[in-house]
């Protein structure tokens, strides 16, 4: 039934007055938007393990909402997406598309393209020429095989087919490269430069195709197409000659004013709309104007970054998914009927992949790239996605592509993009320099004498920061470990690794380019005044004479641990400090989870770190104030049961004892059993691989001489007492029954601001071994650390230390089995611990 669009009202009077909100434009648009957002986010979550770009989920969500799936139900289609709502939905979506292409233009740096050299240009030329020719060849086949495909003119149909098979989706490729940590490698930079060349050429060809196609099915004089092209060239010339210098002046003014003025941002956004209007007025699609305007914005300085931050979430998160919904409503996979149609789909996919990959591969080999890099580059350049969908939608809007041809090309774009990430991960595994080259790292050291001018020993610490809430407690912890200071320089060298989750936002991609070199995090020469983490630790460095080097790691959380371990190995650090994934609530005082996925990052670092690791559970350590070097600000208690982790915790405490403002107490727990059968009782740890590691403590499975370990425990205690004489207190605490309650009493007393414990992966005391069967809240903390973190009434912060030792690296859940001393020995993977 035909509907007069002018009769549609914007908002209803409400259901109580008899109005159905779904019959009014604005409430229906709200419902459509919510439906699109929920479905696209759900699919993005499901595709996350496959490491697919978000655009895949959004395209599929649009197809599901259209006539290919849910839209088969005519009641749903006429209720949620009635025909009269299509112009409204598409208008809002086109605004999002206009600003998205503006963002794409902002990402493209023409200066970097010019600097990329002839290799990238040659690869781009081959990557667009051969598939374009293949697309033209396939176009002849489709015109003769698909009913109705020959209704369009030859010239625009051939150009649209050539562009659709030859285009590389620059924004999607950038996000895939960033996800795979390849964006700043030689391969990634070549791919990005070639894709940029490709994109510029594709948009020129698209403008040509639009000019040739004219209006919906109309046949006009070639003179009109010529006038459209000439007008487009004049528009580009005006943008470069007149508008570009003006925007450079605007960027400088905005930066001089500190970026606080909204006037320049608003003026720029108005420029996007005006540019879109002008190209639409000329006869080229409005998105071409937004793209060109984004290209001429100066990329230097903070103005571009501020622009991106202001609009990217609203555009990419809200408006752009509506474009996929409107595209999905036009895509009917059911129009691909019969074996012949599906054969055409396979032909298009094979032709697109073969032309792009082979053309890129051959030229890349000619540019002296390796065989693996060349084939990987071919698959990367085969990335389609959003830009491809834009080209196809314009072709359908201009009546150049019919329903079946449109559906075939959409599925081709989906397939080629979907296979990119898994294929590249399978065939290209770049070498990561400096990972696990040495079996042992330099140990933590403390001495009893002040450092001399010729003392070259230094403690290198890598401190990881998740959020700004981590800064006060980490600075106070580092201050306690600073040791003695000669007033000029400290023996502590501090690397601050700011951990930033990689997203598909344009600002995130810009950060990757500035924070990584050759695919790895690097130490920057300049400190960003907007980076509050670097500013805070920079101020601490000046006050405490500690050398601080800031580094930023931008990765997906699934691979963040690789950056942490690589930086630790390259910088030859002795200790990694990690913040716990929970923070104390200011209201309730309890620990609140601020990011469960950060817990997985911490666990992977603990498992793969090339040095010792300390995990800080903060309950307000330092109270937000830096520890004084004159007065005792806090007491620190180190709890010692025995084993490699506890010995490393004792080393950390010994380092803290050197600080004049820290009072350290070493508390050794020993068995209080006196006589009777319990004195001869031991515990055997039996491997239990069937247990869930998420709910069970893990212990080392290495076969180590326990008596030798106990000798090392005694030597560590003796060394601690010798080196910290008059600086720290040493006590022994007898435990007769409940060791957990004895430990918790320390945390509840309030006498210590920080309690240092070992993770206890290889206990030499049966007091810890008996705890292996307790249910675990967070196994990565070990039984003692876990008890202190989740014990009721504990007010102290907790530092859990894990020693790096290749011998004890293999861990698994175990089952404690009580035995009589002498009944078993440490054989066949079972170990027996007796009371000390």
Image (spheres, helix red, strand yellow):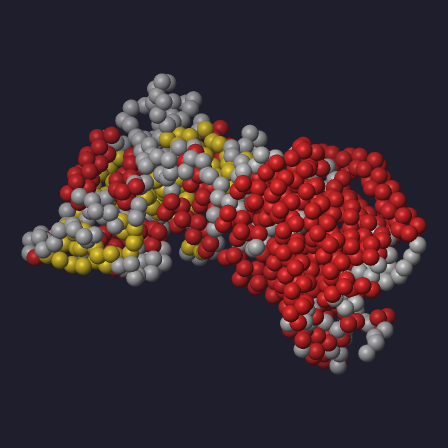
Left or right of 27, for residue 468: left
Residue in view at x 91 percent, y 52 percent = 222
Left or right of 731, for residue 823: left
Q: How many marks?
A: 0
Q: Nearer the viewer, residue 572 or 746?
A: 572
- Kindly indicate the quadrant of the structure image that contains residue 436: top left
Residue in view at x 70 percent, y 78 percent = 74
- Kindly indicate the quadrant of the structure image that contains residue 12: bottom right
Which residue reaches farthest left?
Answer: 676
Q: Does residue 45 appear in this view?
A: yes
Relative to 2, residue 663 above or below? above
Q: Nearer the viewer, residue 424 or 317?
A: 424
Relative to 152, residue 454 above or below? above
Q: Nearer the viewer, residue 492 or 565?
A: 565
Q: Position of residue 85 (x, y in %)?
A: 77, 69
Q: Position of residue 677 (x, y in %)?
A: 7, 57
Q: Does residue 31 appear in this view?
A: no
Residue in view at x 30 percent, y 40 percent = 805
Left or right of 471, for residue 614: left
Residue in view at x 61 percent, y 39 percent = 364
Q: Position of residue 251 (x, y in %)?
A: 74, 37
Q: Position of residue 184 (x, y in %)?
A: 57, 38
Quadrant (top left, top right, bottom left, bottom right) of the N terminus? bottom right
Q: Nearer the viewer, residue 74 or 532?
A: 74
């Amino acid at each position: 039934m035909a509907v007069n669009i002018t009769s549609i009202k914007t908002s209803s009077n409400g259901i109580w007055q008899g109005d159905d909100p779904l019959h009014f434009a604005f409430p229906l648009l709200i419902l459509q938007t919510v439906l699109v957002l929920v479905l696209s986010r759900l699919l993005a979550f499901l595709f996350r393990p496959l490491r697919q770009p978000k655009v895949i989920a959004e395209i599929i969500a649009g197809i599901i909402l259209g006539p290919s799936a849910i839209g088969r139900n005519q009641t749903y289609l006429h209720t949620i997406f009635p025909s009269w709502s299509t112009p409204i939905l598409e208008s809002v979506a086109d605004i999002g598309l206009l600003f998205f292409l503006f963002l794409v233009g902002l990402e493209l740096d023409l200066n970097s393209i010019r600097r990329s050299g002839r290799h990238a240009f040659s690869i781009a030329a081959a990557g667009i020429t051969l598939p374009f020719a293949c697309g033209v060849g396939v176009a002849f086949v489709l015109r003769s095989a698909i009913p109705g495909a020959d209704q369009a003119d030859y010239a625009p149909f051939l150009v649209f087919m050539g562009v659709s098979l030859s285009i590389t989706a620059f924004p999607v490729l950038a996000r895939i490269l960033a996800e795979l940590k390849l964006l700043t490698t030689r391969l990634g930079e070549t791919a990005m430069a070639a894709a940029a060349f490709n994109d510029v050429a594709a948009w020129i060809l698209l403008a040509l195709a639009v000019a040739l196609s004219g209006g919906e099915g109309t046949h006009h004089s070639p003179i009109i197409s010529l006038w459209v092209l000439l007008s487009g060239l004049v528009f580009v010339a005006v943008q470069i000659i007149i508008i570009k210098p003006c925007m450079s002046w605007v960027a400088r003014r905005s930066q001089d004013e500190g970026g606080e003025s909204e006037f320049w941002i608003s003026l720029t956004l108005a420029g996007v709309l005006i540019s879109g209007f002008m190209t639409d007025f000329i006869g080229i699609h409005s998105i071409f104007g937004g793209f060109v305007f984004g290209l001429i914005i100066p990329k230097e300085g903070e103005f571009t970054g501020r622009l991106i931050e202001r609009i990217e979430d609203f555009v990419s998160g809200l408006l752009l998914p509506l474009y996929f919904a409107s595209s999905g409503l036009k895509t009917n996979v059911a129009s691909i009927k019969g074996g012949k149609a599906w054969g055409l789909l396979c032909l298009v996919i094979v032709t697109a992949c073969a032309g792009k990959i082979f053309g890129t591969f051959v030229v890349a080999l000619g540019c002296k790239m390796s065989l693996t890099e060349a084939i990987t580059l071919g698959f990367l350049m085969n990335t389609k996605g959003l830009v491809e969908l834009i080209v196809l939608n314009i072709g359908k809007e201009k009546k150049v592509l019919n329903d079946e041809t449109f559906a075939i090309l959409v599925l081709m774009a989906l397939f080629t993009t979907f296979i990119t990430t898994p294929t590249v991960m399978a065939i290209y595994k770049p070498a990561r320099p400096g990972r696990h080259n040495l079996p042992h790292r330099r140990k933590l050291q403390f001495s009893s004498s002040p450092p001399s001018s010729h003392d070259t020993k230094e403690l290198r610490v890598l401190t990881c920061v998740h959020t700004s809430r981590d800064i006060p407690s980490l600075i106070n912890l580092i201050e306690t470990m600073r040791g003695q200071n000669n007033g000029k320089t400290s023996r502590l060298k501090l690397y601050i690794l700011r951990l930033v989750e990689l997203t598909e936002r344009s600002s995130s991609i810009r950060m990757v380019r500035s924070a990584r070199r050759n695919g790895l995090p690097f130490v920057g020469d300049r400190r960003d005044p907007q980076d509050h983490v670097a500013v805070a630790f920079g101020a601490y460095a000046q006050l405490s004479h500690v050398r601080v080097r800031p580094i930023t790691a931008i990765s997906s959380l699934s691979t963040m641990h690789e950056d942490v371990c690589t930086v630790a190995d390259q910088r030859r650090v002795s200790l990694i400090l990690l913040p716990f994934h929970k923070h104390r609530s200011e209201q309730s005082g309890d620990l609140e989870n601020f990011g469960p996925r950060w817990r997985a990052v911490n666990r992977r670092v603990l498992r793969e770190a090339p040095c010792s690791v300390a995990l800080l559970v903060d309950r307000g350590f330092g109270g937000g104030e830096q520890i004084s070097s004159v007065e005792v600000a806090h007491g620190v208690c180190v709890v010692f049961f025995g084993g490699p982790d506890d010995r490393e915790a004792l080393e950390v405490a010994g380092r803290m004892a050197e600080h004049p403002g820290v009072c350290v107490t070493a508390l050794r727990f020993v068995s209080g059993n006196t006589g009777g059968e319990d004195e001869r009782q031991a515990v055997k740890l039996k491997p239990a691989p069937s247990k869930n590691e998420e709910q069970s403590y893990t212990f080392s499975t290495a076969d180590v001489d326990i008596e030798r370990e106990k000798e090392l425990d005694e030597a560590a205690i003796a060394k601690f007492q010798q080196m910290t004489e008059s600086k720290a207190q040493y006590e022994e605490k007898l435990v007769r029954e409940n060791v957990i309650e004895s430990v918790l009493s320390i945390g509840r007393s309030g006498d210590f601001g920080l309690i240092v414990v070992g993770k206890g992966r290889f206990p030499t005391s049966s007091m810890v071994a008996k705890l292996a069967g307790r249910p675990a809240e967070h196994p990565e903390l070990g039984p003692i650390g876990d008890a202190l973190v989740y014990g009721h009434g504990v007010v102290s912060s907790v530092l859990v230390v894990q020693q790096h030792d290749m011998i004890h690296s293999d861990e698994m859940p175990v089952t404690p089995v009580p035995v009589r001393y002498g009944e078993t020995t440490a054989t066949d993977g079972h170990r027996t611990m007796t009371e000390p």
